[in-house]
């Protein structure tokens, strides 16, 4: 069923470029209906140059809350009137909460990924984790792993200075920044428990160097934050090497549930959101 829209209906949405692929509208609209909340959630495509004006305009128009996706998470944090601790710590916001003073920024990405990993019975405590990428998604995920007690946390990025800047913000004594050449380092790869691709290459925005999966442990878990009809090349190659894989749909579910609660003050109807997401996911 489609949500009814009235003059009293509160409007939420998601900002991104691209954003047409997002399954958040299906998931959040199902959640609002299940919770009996008079609200609707819509996508707002916006280019980087128009982000500041869009956020200001949407606040003026009475928009009740927003999600933010690539490539705007760091910029959204800078545009918020204030940041909650998670967003301040990682310098990126994926959730904007309406207040009397303006939009407050928070970040549910890292907590969402940890919840998705828990469903796969993966505990990051004492594990060696490699993150590929140093953008807004990587920032929130890196902070979450640092707080969760990973044994080592490596951020690899095409531009090593970006990785270094990120690592300097992390509360982790064994966080390190590296270039993408580490993806071919056999000795390093053999020590890993988890690799997370935090780049947007799965959306067709470039390609990563190939990971030498033959040098990784057989029980390695490989995660890509992107989701869609087809697994990314990163996940296809990991699967082809017999490594465990997961896409970003679990993280999408849990970060969305956390955002729902931040906006409404109500527990998220997680089972309803999961079914809506599964129904909306393209057939594979």
Image (tube, helix red, strand yellow):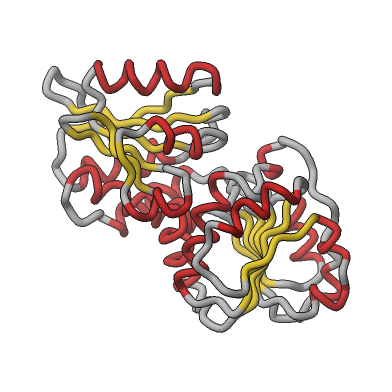
Please name the residue shown 71% across and 50% down the image: 232
In screen coordinates, is 5 left or right of 69? Answer: left
Front residue of this view, candidates 249 and 210: 210
What is the residue that sits farthest to the bottom in this orientation? 126
Placement of the N terminus among the 4 image quadrants: top left
The answer to whether 167 is drawn above or below residue 76 in the figure is below
Dividing the picture into quadrants, the one containing residue 5 is: top left
The answer to whether 269 is drawn above or below residue 188 in the figure is above
Image coordinates for residue 138, horizontal then vertical, percent: 58, 52
Image coordinates for residue 168, horizontal then vertical, percent: 58, 58
User: What is the total number of numbered labels drawn onto the structure image?
Assistant: 0
Please name the residue shown 43% across and 58% down the image: 112
Front residue of this view, candidates 171 and 24: 171
The answer to whether 71 is drawn above or below residue 54 in the figure is below
Dividing the picture into quadrants, the one containing residue 156 is: bottom right
Image coordinates for residue 186, horizontal then vertical, percent: 88, 74
Dividing the picture into quadrants, the one containing residue 11 is: top left
Front residue of this view, candidates 85 and 181: 85
Please name the residue shown 54% across and 45% down the image: 136
């Amino acid at each position: 069923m489609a949500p009814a829209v009235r003059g009293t209906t509160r409007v939420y949405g998601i900002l991104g470029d691209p954003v047409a692929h997002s399954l958040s509208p299906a998931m959040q609209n199902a959640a609002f209906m299940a919770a009996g909340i008079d609200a609707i959630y819509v996508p707002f495509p916006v280019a980087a140059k128009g982000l500041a004006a869009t956020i200001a305009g949407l606040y003026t128009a009475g928009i009740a809350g927003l999600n933010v996706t690539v490539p705007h998470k760091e910029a959204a944090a800078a545009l918020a009137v204030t940041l909650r601790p998670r967003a301040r710590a990682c310098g990126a916001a994926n959730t904007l909460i309406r207040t009397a003073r303006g939009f407050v920024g928070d970040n549910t990405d890292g907590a969402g990924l940890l919840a998705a990993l828990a469903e796969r019975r993966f505990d990051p405590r004492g594990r060696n984790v490699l993150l590929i990428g140093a953008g807004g998604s990587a920032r929130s995920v890196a902070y979450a792993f640092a707080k969760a007690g990973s044994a080592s946390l490596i951020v690899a990025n095409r531009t090593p200075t970006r990785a270094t800047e990120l690592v300097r913000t992390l509360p982790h004594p064994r966080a390190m920044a590296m270039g993408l050449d580490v993806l071919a380092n056999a000795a390093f790869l053999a020590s890993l428990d988890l690799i997370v691709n935090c780049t947007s290459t799965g959306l067709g925005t470039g390609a990563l160097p190939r990971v030498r999966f033959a040098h990784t442990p057989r029980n390695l878990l490989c995660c890509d934050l992107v989701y869609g009809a087809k697994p990314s090349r990163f996940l296809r190659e990991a699967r082809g090497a017999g490594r465990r894989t997961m896409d970003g749909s679990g993280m999408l579910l849990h970060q969305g549930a956390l955002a729902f609660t931040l906006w409404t003050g109500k527990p998220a109807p997680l089972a309803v959101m999961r079914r809506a997401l599964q129904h909306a996911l393209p057939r594979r």
